[in-house]
Amino acid sequence: CNRVDDDCDGLVDEAAICPDVNAPVVQVAVVPNPGVAEQPVQIIVSAQDDRGVAALGATVDGQPVALNAQGVGTWRPDHAGDFAVVGFALDAAGNRGEAQVALAVGCGVSAHCDLGERCAAGACEPGCDADDRCPDGQICDAERCRVGCRGDGCDPRAIIDATPADIPLGDDFQTVVRLDGRRSDGGAGRTFQWRVAPGRVVGGGLDQPTVDVVFPGTGDATISLLVTANGSTDTGRALVRALGPPVVILPAQVTVEAGAEVVLDASDSMDPEGEALAFVWTLLDGPGAGDLAPEGATARFSAATVGAYAIRARVTAGGRQAEAIVQVNVVPALADARPWPLNVVVNPQPVAVGAPTTITLVTDPQDAPPTLRLLVDGAPVALDAAGRAVVTFDAVGGYALQADAEGEDR
Protein backbone atom coordinates (compact mmCIF):
# COMPACT_ATOMS: atom_id res chain seq x y z
CA CYS A 1 0.00 0.00 0.00
CA ASN A 2 2.81 2.35 -0.92
CA ARG A 3 2.17 2.81 -4.65
CA VAL A 4 5.11 0.42 -5.31
CA ASP A 5 4.95 -2.86 -7.27
CA ASP A 6 6.25 -4.92 -4.33
CA ASP A 7 5.59 -8.34 -5.92
CA CYS A 8 6.76 -7.41 -9.41
CA ASP A 9 3.46 -8.26 -11.08
CA GLY A 10 3.05 -4.90 -12.77
CA LEU A 11 0.36 -3.71 -10.29
CA VAL A 12 0.53 -1.53 -7.22
CA ASP A 13 -1.61 -1.56 -4.09
CA GLU A 14 -3.70 -4.62 -5.01
CA ALA A 15 -6.81 -5.42 -3.00
CA ALA A 16 -5.25 -8.58 -1.71
CA ILE A 17 -2.56 -6.51 -0.05
CA CYS A 18 -4.28 -3.20 0.84
CA PRO A 19 -7.42 -2.72 2.97
CA ASP A 20 -10.40 -0.94 1.33
CA VAL A 21 -10.60 2.54 2.88
CA ASN A 22 -12.30 4.48 0.06
CA ALA A 23 -16.04 5.21 0.38
CA PRO A 24 -18.31 5.01 -2.67
CA VAL A 25 -19.06 8.23 -4.55
CA VAL A 26 -22.84 8.75 -4.44
CA GLN A 27 -25.30 10.76 -6.50
CA VAL A 28 -29.00 11.29 -5.62
CA ALA A 29 -31.82 12.87 -7.61
CA VAL A 30 -35.52 13.51 -6.94
CA VAL A 31 -38.07 13.72 -9.77
CA PRO A 32 -40.07 15.93 -9.82
CA ASN A 33 -38.55 18.58 -7.61
CA PRO A 34 -40.43 20.60 -6.44
CA GLY A 35 -43.22 18.13 -5.78
CA VAL A 36 -46.83 18.35 -4.61
CA ALA A 37 -48.24 16.86 -1.43
CA GLU A 38 -49.89 13.43 -1.89
CA GLN A 39 -48.23 13.08 -5.30
CA PRO A 40 -45.42 10.47 -5.54
CA VAL A 41 -41.83 11.43 -6.33
CA GLN A 42 -39.03 9.16 -7.52
CA ILE A 43 -35.76 9.00 -5.61
CA ILE A 44 -32.84 7.80 -7.73
CA VAL A 45 -29.55 6.78 -6.08
CA SER A 46 -26.39 5.80 -7.99
CA ALA A 47 -22.83 5.17 -6.80
CA GLN A 48 -19.32 4.31 -7.99
CA ASP A 49 -16.63 2.48 -6.04
CA ASP A 50 -13.19 1.20 -7.07
CA ARG A 51 -14.01 -2.24 -5.61
CA GLY A 52 -17.74 -2.35 -6.27
CA VAL A 53 -20.94 -1.24 -4.51
CA ALA A 54 -22.56 -3.67 -2.12
CA ALA A 55 -25.80 -1.84 -1.26
CA LEU A 56 -27.79 1.34 -1.99
CA GLY A 57 -30.27 3.11 0.27
CA ALA A 58 -32.18 6.36 0.82
CA THR A 59 -33.92 8.29 3.59
CA VAL A 60 -36.28 11.28 3.70
CA ASP A 61 -35.92 13.33 6.87
CA GLY A 62 -34.29 10.27 8.44
CA GLN A 63 -37.05 7.80 7.48
CA PRO A 64 -35.94 4.94 5.16
CA VAL A 65 -37.24 4.65 1.60
CA ALA A 66 -37.14 1.27 -0.16
CA LEU A 67 -35.11 1.14 -3.39
CA ASN A 68 -35.21 -1.49 -6.12
CA ALA A 69 -32.15 -3.17 -7.60
CA GLN A 70 -31.55 -0.20 -9.87
CA GLY A 71 -31.51 2.22 -6.91
CA VAL A 72 -34.94 3.73 -7.64
CA GLY A 73 -37.62 4.24 -4.99
CA THR A 74 -40.98 6.00 -4.67
CA TRP A 75 -42.00 8.26 -1.81
CA ARG A 76 -45.32 10.05 -1.29
CA PRO A 77 -45.26 13.24 0.86
CA ASP A 78 -48.42 13.74 2.92
CA HIS A 79 -47.95 17.47 3.56
CA ALA A 80 -46.20 20.51 2.14
CA GLY A 81 -42.76 21.55 3.32
CA ASP A 82 -39.04 21.15 2.76
CA PHE A 83 -37.51 17.69 3.11
CA ALA A 84 -33.92 16.40 3.24
CA VAL A 85 -33.41 13.43 0.88
CA VAL A 86 -30.23 11.42 1.53
CA GLY A 87 -28.92 8.71 -0.79
CA PHE A 88 -26.16 6.39 0.45
CA ALA A 89 -24.07 3.43 -0.69
CA LEU A 90 -22.01 0.76 1.10
CA ASP A 91 -19.10 -1.25 -0.26
CA ALA A 92 -18.02 -4.72 0.85
CA ALA A 93 -15.67 -3.27 3.44
CA GLY A 94 -18.51 -1.32 5.03
CA ASN A 95 -17.38 2.09 3.81
CA ARG A 96 -20.37 4.43 3.47
CA GLY A 97 -20.73 7.32 1.06
CA GLU A 98 -23.75 9.60 0.82
CA ALA A 99 -25.20 12.65 -0.93
CA GLN A 100 -28.08 14.91 0.01
CA VAL A 101 -30.62 16.98 -1.95
CA ALA A 102 -33.39 19.30 -0.72
CA LEU A 103 -36.93 18.46 -1.84
CA ALA A 104 -39.52 21.26 -1.84
CA VAL A 105 -43.10 20.03 -1.64
CA GLY A 106 -45.94 22.42 -2.41
CA CYS A 107 -49.58 22.16 -1.46
CA GLY A 108 -52.60 21.18 -3.50
CA VAL A 109 -55.17 22.07 -0.84
CA SER A 110 -54.97 23.80 2.54
CA ALA A 111 -55.11 20.43 4.32
CA HIS A 112 -51.54 19.89 3.13
CA CYS A 113 -50.42 22.89 5.22
CA ASP A 114 -49.92 23.32 8.97
CA LEU A 115 -52.71 24.72 11.14
CA GLY A 116 -52.91 28.47 10.74
CA GLU A 117 -51.82 28.23 7.10
CA ARG A 118 -53.69 28.02 3.81
CA CYS A 119 -52.69 26.91 0.33
CA ALA A 120 -52.29 29.74 -2.20
CA ALA A 121 -50.74 29.26 -5.65
CA GLY A 122 -49.20 25.95 -4.59
CA ALA A 123 -47.50 27.34 -1.47
CA CYS A 124 -48.49 27.50 2.18
CA GLU A 125 -48.89 30.98 3.65
CA PRO A 126 -50.24 32.35 6.96
CA GLY A 127 -54.04 32.38 6.94
CA CYS A 128 -57.01 30.06 6.77
CA ASP A 129 -60.01 29.19 4.64
CA ALA A 130 -62.05 27.22 7.20
CA ASP A 131 -62.38 26.96 10.97
CA ASP A 132 -60.81 23.48 11.01
CA ARG A 133 -57.60 25.01 9.65
CA CYS A 134 -57.15 26.97 12.91
CA PRO A 135 -55.82 25.78 16.29
CA ASP A 136 -58.28 24.81 19.03
CA GLY A 137 -60.18 27.76 20.46
CA GLN A 138 -59.81 29.81 17.28
CA ILE A 139 -62.00 30.45 14.25
CA CYS A 140 -61.21 31.51 10.71
CA ASP A 141 -62.28 35.13 10.31
CA ALA A 142 -61.43 37.22 7.22
CA GLU A 143 -58.90 34.54 6.18
CA ARG A 144 -57.08 34.80 9.51
CA CYS A 145 -57.27 32.67 12.65
CA ARG A 146 -58.39 34.48 15.78
CA VAL A 147 -59.64 33.61 19.25
CA GLY A 148 -63.43 33.29 19.18
CA CYS A 149 -66.35 30.97 18.61
CA ARG A 150 -69.45 30.72 16.48
CA GLY A 151 -73.08 30.20 17.40
CA ASP A 152 -75.70 31.66 19.71
CA GLY A 153 -74.02 30.40 22.87
CA CYS A 154 -70.79 32.32 22.36
CA ASP A 155 -69.66 35.20 24.53
CA PRO A 156 -69.77 38.57 22.75
CA ARG A 157 -66.65 39.89 21.10
CA ALA A 158 -66.79 43.30 19.41
CA ILE A 159 -64.96 43.53 16.09
CA ILE A 160 -64.95 46.70 13.97
CA ASP A 161 -64.11 47.00 10.28
CA ALA A 162 -63.78 50.61 9.06
CA THR A 163 -63.74 51.26 5.31
CA PRO A 164 -61.83 53.39 4.54
CA ALA A 165 -59.80 53.53 7.73
CA ASP A 166 -58.01 56.72 6.60
CA ILE A 167 -59.53 60.02 5.46
CA PRO A 168 -57.84 63.20 4.20
CA LEU A 169 -56.78 65.74 6.79
CA GLY A 170 -59.35 68.56 6.78
CA ASP A 171 -61.90 66.30 5.07
CA ASP A 172 -64.80 68.43 6.41
CA PHE A 173 -67.38 65.61 6.44
CA GLN A 174 -66.85 64.66 2.79
CA THR A 175 -65.65 61.02 2.97
CA VAL A 176 -68.22 58.41 4.02
CA VAL A 177 -66.73 55.75 6.32
CA ARG A 178 -68.60 52.44 6.61
CA LEU A 179 -68.36 51.03 10.16
CA ASP A 180 -69.14 47.31 10.12
CA GLY A 181 -69.57 45.15 13.23
CA ARG A 182 -71.02 42.05 11.58
CA ARG A 183 -67.94 39.94 12.30
CA SER A 184 -68.53 40.33 16.04
CA ASP A 185 -69.12 37.16 18.10
CA GLY A 186 -72.26 36.52 20.12
CA GLY A 187 -74.69 34.78 17.81
CA ALA A 188 -77.81 35.96 16.04
CA GLY A 189 -79.25 37.66 19.14
CA ARG A 190 -76.35 40.04 19.76
CA THR A 191 -77.09 43.78 19.91
CA PHE A 192 -74.95 46.75 18.86
CA GLN A 193 -74.34 50.25 20.17
CA TRP A 194 -71.94 52.58 18.30
CA ARG A 195 -70.21 55.71 19.59
CA VAL A 196 -68.87 57.80 16.72
CA ALA A 197 -68.34 61.35 18.05
CA PRO A 198 -67.25 63.72 16.49
CA GLY A 199 -68.68 61.98 13.43
CA ARG A 200 -72.12 62.41 11.91
CA VAL A 201 -74.33 59.47 10.95
CA VAL A 202 -75.37 59.58 7.29
CA GLY A 203 -76.64 56.00 6.87
CA GLY A 204 -77.77 53.09 9.02
CA GLY A 205 -78.15 53.56 12.76
CA LEU A 206 -76.12 53.56 15.94
CA ASP A 207 -77.91 50.35 17.01
CA GLN A 208 -77.35 48.55 13.72
CA PRO A 209 -74.55 46.16 12.68
CA THR A 210 -73.35 48.73 10.13
CA VAL A 211 -73.44 52.51 10.13
CA ASP A 212 -72.15 55.13 7.68
CA VAL A 213 -70.38 58.11 9.25
CA VAL A 214 -68.60 61.27 8.08
CA PHE A 215 -65.90 63.01 10.13
CA PRO A 216 -64.48 66.56 10.26
CA GLY A 217 -60.95 65.36 9.56
CA THR A 218 -59.39 67.77 12.04
CA GLY A 219 -57.62 64.84 13.68
CA ASP A 220 -57.86 61.11 14.31
CA ALA A 221 -61.27 59.88 15.54
CA THR A 222 -61.68 56.98 17.98
CA ILE A 223 -64.89 55.00 17.53
CA SER A 224 -66.24 52.28 19.82
CA LEU A 225 -68.73 49.45 19.53
CA LEU A 226 -70.55 47.81 22.45
CA VAL A 227 -71.80 44.29 21.69
CA THR A 228 -74.21 42.56 24.08
CA ALA A 229 -75.09 38.84 23.97
CA ASN A 230 -76.07 36.12 26.46
CA GLY A 231 -76.01 38.56 29.36
CA SER A 232 -72.46 39.74 28.69
CA THR A 233 -70.94 42.73 26.90
CA ASP A 234 -67.73 43.46 25.06
CA THR A 235 -66.36 46.75 23.74
CA GLY A 236 -64.18 47.15 20.69
CA ARG A 237 -62.40 50.26 19.47
CA ALA A 238 -61.03 51.40 16.14
CA LEU A 239 -59.25 54.48 14.86
CA VAL A 240 -60.18 56.50 11.78
CA ARG A 241 -57.04 58.43 10.92
CA ALA A 242 -56.97 61.86 9.31
CA LEU A 243 -53.88 61.88 7.14
CA GLY A 244 -52.25 64.82 5.43
CA PRO A 245 -51.31 64.65 1.77
CA PRO A 246 -47.74 64.10 0.59
CA VAL A 247 -45.54 67.17 0.23
CA VAL A 248 -44.39 67.92 -3.31
CA ILE A 249 -41.08 69.79 -3.48
CA LEU A 250 -40.48 71.20 -6.96
CA PRO A 251 -38.94 74.48 -8.20
CA ALA A 252 -41.49 77.11 -9.23
CA GLN A 253 -39.53 78.03 -12.37
CA VAL A 254 -36.56 76.80 -14.35
CA THR A 255 -34.95 78.20 -17.49
CA VAL A 256 -33.44 76.26 -20.37
CA GLU A 257 -32.28 77.09 -23.87
CA ALA A 258 -34.33 75.93 -26.84
CA GLY A 259 -33.34 72.42 -27.87
CA ALA A 260 -31.46 71.76 -24.63
CA GLU A 261 -32.63 69.37 -21.92
CA VAL A 262 -33.45 70.24 -18.31
CA VAL A 263 -34.00 67.80 -15.44
CA LEU A 264 -37.05 68.54 -13.28
CA ASP A 265 -36.34 67.15 -9.82
CA ALA A 266 -39.03 66.38 -7.23
CA SER A 267 -36.95 63.79 -5.34
CA ASP A 268 -37.07 65.81 -2.11
CA SER A 269 -40.84 65.24 -1.92
CA MET A 270 -41.99 63.29 1.13
CA ASP A 271 -45.00 61.75 2.84
CA PRO A 272 -45.66 62.50 6.54
CA GLU A 273 -46.86 58.91 7.01
CA GLY A 274 -43.75 57.42 5.41
CA GLU A 275 -45.61 55.74 2.54
CA ALA A 276 -43.86 55.14 -0.76
CA LEU A 277 -44.33 57.90 -3.34
CA ALA A 278 -45.55 57.44 -6.91
CA PHE A 279 -45.01 60.25 -9.45
CA VAL A 280 -46.99 61.18 -12.57
CA TRP A 281 -45.62 63.97 -14.79
CA THR A 282 -47.87 65.84 -17.26
CA LEU A 283 -47.19 68.64 -19.75
CA LEU A 284 -50.18 70.94 -19.24
CA ASP A 285 -49.49 73.92 -21.50
CA GLY A 286 -46.92 75.54 -23.75
CA PRO A 287 -46.46 77.35 -27.06
CA GLY A 288 -45.33 74.20 -28.85
CA ALA A 289 -44.73 70.50 -28.50
CA GLY A 290 -42.28 69.45 -25.82
CA ASP A 291 -40.48 66.20 -25.07
CA LEU A 292 -41.28 65.09 -21.50
CA ALA A 293 -39.57 61.90 -20.27
CA PRO A 294 -40.66 60.90 -16.73
CA GLU A 295 -38.15 58.95 -14.63
CA GLY A 296 -39.83 58.43 -11.27
CA ALA A 297 -39.16 61.42 -9.02
CA THR A 298 -37.47 63.27 -11.89
CA ALA A 299 -38.37 64.07 -15.48
CA ARG A 300 -36.33 65.27 -18.44
CA PHE A 301 -37.83 68.01 -20.64
CA SER A 302 -36.80 69.80 -23.81
CA ALA A 303 -38.59 71.97 -26.37
CA ALA A 304 -37.63 73.66 -29.62
CA THR A 305 -40.15 76.50 -29.38
CA VAL A 306 -39.33 79.50 -27.18
CA GLY A 307 -41.88 80.28 -24.47
CA ALA A 308 -43.29 79.22 -21.10
CA TYR A 309 -44.35 75.61 -20.48
CA ALA A 310 -46.39 74.38 -17.50
CA ILE A 311 -45.54 70.89 -16.22
CA ARG A 312 -47.35 69.19 -13.34
CA ALA A 313 -45.90 66.65 -10.92
CA ARG A 314 -48.65 64.68 -9.19
CA VAL A 315 -47.54 62.60 -6.20
CA THR A 316 -49.56 59.76 -4.68
CA ALA A 317 -48.87 58.10 -1.31
CA GLY A 318 -51.22 55.56 0.23
CA GLY A 319 -54.14 56.82 -1.86
CA ARG A 320 -53.51 60.48 -0.93
CA GLN A 321 -52.48 62.97 -3.60
CA ALA A 322 -50.75 66.30 -3.96
CA GLU A 323 -49.38 68.15 -6.94
CA ALA A 324 -47.16 71.05 -7.93
CA ILE A 325 -46.58 72.88 -11.21
CA VAL A 326 -43.23 74.08 -12.50
CA GLN A 327 -42.92 76.71 -15.22
CA VAL A 328 -40.18 75.93 -17.70
CA ASN A 329 -39.01 79.05 -19.51
CA VAL A 330 -37.49 78.07 -22.85
CA VAL A 331 -35.27 80.90 -24.12
CA PRO A 332 -33.37 81.30 -27.39
CA ALA A 333 -30.14 79.39 -27.58
CA LEU A 334 -27.05 81.54 -27.05
CA ALA A 335 -25.97 80.92 -30.63
CA ASP A 336 -29.15 82.66 -31.82
CA ALA A 337 -29.35 85.40 -29.21
CA ARG A 338 -27.09 87.95 -30.95
CA PRO A 339 -27.36 91.45 -29.46
CA TRP A 340 -28.67 94.22 -31.65
CA PRO A 341 -26.01 96.68 -32.92
CA LEU A 342 -27.04 99.87 -31.14
CA ASN A 343 -25.40 103.29 -30.96
CA VAL A 344 -26.48 106.43 -29.13
CA VAL A 345 -25.80 109.76 -30.89
CA VAL A 346 -26.14 113.06 -28.96
CA ASN A 347 -26.23 116.32 -30.92
CA PRO A 348 -24.95 118.94 -30.35
CA GLN A 349 -21.83 118.25 -28.40
CA PRO A 350 -21.20 119.66 -25.88
CA VAL A 351 -24.75 119.98 -24.55
CA ALA A 352 -25.87 123.45 -23.52
CA VAL A 353 -28.10 123.99 -20.50
CA GLY A 354 -31.64 124.88 -21.58
CA ALA A 355 -30.98 124.20 -25.28
CA PRO A 356 -32.78 121.44 -27.21
CA THR A 357 -30.62 118.29 -27.56
CA THR A 358 -31.35 115.55 -30.09
CA ILE A 359 -30.67 111.98 -28.98
CA THR A 360 -30.80 109.36 -31.75
CA LEU A 361 -30.71 105.56 -31.36
CA VAL A 362 -29.02 104.00 -34.40
CA THR A 363 -29.44 100.28 -35.27
CA ASP A 364 -28.46 98.03 -38.20
CA PRO A 365 -30.67 99.15 -41.10
CA GLN A 366 -30.42 95.69 -42.74
CA ASP A 367 -32.29 94.01 -39.88
CA ALA A 368 -35.98 94.16 -39.18
CA PRO A 369 -36.51 97.25 -37.03
CA PRO A 370 -36.47 96.43 -33.33
CA THR A 371 -38.43 98.01 -30.53
CA LEU A 372 -36.35 100.90 -29.15
CA ARG A 373 -36.46 102.39 -25.68
CA LEU A 374 -34.68 105.37 -24.15
CA LEU A 375 -34.41 106.30 -20.48
CA VAL A 376 -32.82 109.46 -19.10
CA ASP A 377 -31.93 109.14 -15.43
CA GLY A 378 -34.34 106.19 -15.32
CA ALA A 379 -37.29 108.08 -16.80
CA PRO A 380 -38.65 106.90 -20.18
CA VAL A 381 -38.42 109.35 -23.09
CA ALA A 382 -40.65 109.12 -26.17
CA LEU A 383 -38.95 108.34 -29.47
CA ASP A 384 -40.23 109.12 -32.95
CA ALA A 385 -40.37 106.58 -35.77
CA ALA A 386 -36.73 107.30 -36.63
CA GLY A 387 -35.58 106.59 -33.08
CA ARG A 388 -35.05 110.27 -32.19
CA ALA A 389 -35.96 112.27 -29.10
CA VAL A 390 -35.47 115.95 -28.29
CA VAL A 391 -34.50 116.60 -24.69
CA THR A 392 -33.74 119.80 -22.78
CA PHE A 393 -31.34 119.61 -19.83
CA ASP A 394 -32.10 122.29 -17.22
CA ALA A 395 -29.01 122.03 -15.05
CA VAL A 396 -25.30 121.47 -15.27
CA GLY A 397 -24.27 117.92 -14.32
CA GLY A 398 -24.14 114.29 -15.44
CA TYR A 399 -27.13 112.44 -16.85
CA ALA A 400 -27.51 108.64 -17.30
CA LEU A 401 -28.74 107.55 -20.71
CA GLN A 402 -29.98 103.95 -21.15
CA ALA A 403 -30.90 102.65 -24.61
CA ASP A 404 -32.45 99.21 -25.33
CA ALA A 405 -33.28 97.41 -28.57
CA GLU A 406 -35.36 94.20 -28.60
CA GLY A 407 -36.56 92.07 -31.51
CA GLU A 408 -38.09 88.63 -32.03
CA ASP A 409 -34.92 86.62 -31.52
CA ARG A 410 -32.51 88.98 -29.73
Image (cartoon, rainbow, N blue to C red):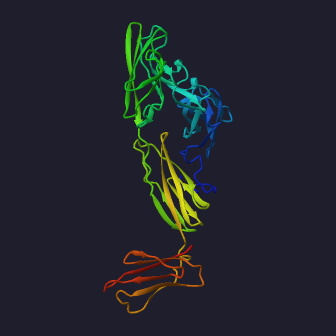
Residue 146 vertical position relative to residue 242 in the rendered view, above or below: above
Q: Quadrant of residue 368?
A: bottom right
Front residue of 280/107: it is: 280
Name, please, the residue furthest toward the right. Answer: 70
Number of numbered discs present?
A: 0
Front residue of 358/290: it is: 358
Residue 88 vertical position relative to residue 308 in the rendered view, above or below: above
**Direction from residue 9 to residue 387 in the image, left or right:** left
Name, please, the residue furthest toward the left. Answer: 396
Residue 338 appears at what percent x and percent y?
Answer: 53, 79
Name, please, the residue furthest toward the bottom. Answer: 349
Front residue of 387/204: it is: 387
Front residue of 258/57: it is: 258
- The residue positioned 57% from the left and 79% from the top of the image is 369
Residue 264 vertical position relative to residue 323 in the rendered view, above or below: below
- The residue positioned 38% from the left and 88% from the top of the image is 355
Residue 195 appears at what percent x and percent y?
Answer: 38, 20
**Direction from residue 86 to residue 345 in the image, left or right:** left
Residue 343 appears at what percent x and percent y?
Answer: 48, 86
Residue 231 appears at what percent x and percent y?
Answer: 38, 7
